[in-house]
Amino acid sequence: MRSNGEKHPAGDQRFRAFPEALFLPYVGDSPEYYESFKAYTDDDYKDIKAEMERLLQSEKYVGLAEQL
């Protein structure tokens, strides 16, 4: 994911250490969740990045992310 010149998460060791921080936006209970995708918008990228940062600051990772 790249947006407005931001560094790709694969190049950030925090995101490589915690791959569960990567997620797909929730689209409801559609059975076609994995069968149809639409292109991400800049707002989608911002939301994904914000969720990654939130997860990395969660209690589970406090201290661990700082060690990287």
Image (cartoon, rainbow, N blue to C red):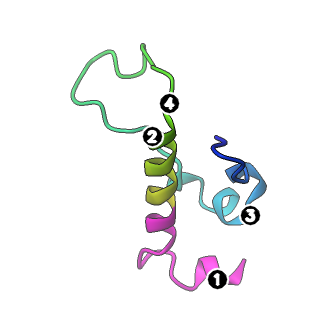
Secondary structure, mark 1, is helix
Q: Position of residue 54 (x, y in %)?
A: 44, 67
- In the picture, the disc for residue 13 is 3
First-in-chain label (3 vs 4):
3
What amino acid type should be assigned to the residue bearing mark 2? Asp
Residue 7 located left or right of residue 55: right
Cα separation, mark 4 vs mark 1, equals 30 Å
> Residue at coordinates 47% horizontally, 75% vertically from top-left?
57
First-in-chain label (1 vs 2):
2
Q: How many marks?
A: 4
Q: For the residue carrying disc 4, how many other residues have a C-alpha within 10 Å: few (<14), some (14-19), or many (20+)? A: few
Cα separation, mark 2 vs mark 4, equals 6 Å
Residue carrying label 2: 44
First-in-chain label (3 vs 1):
3
Q: Position of residue 50 (x, y in %)?
A: 46, 59
What amino acid type should be assigned to the residue bearing mark 4? Tyr
Residue carrying label 4: 40
Q: Position of residue 4 (x, y in %)?
A: 65, 46
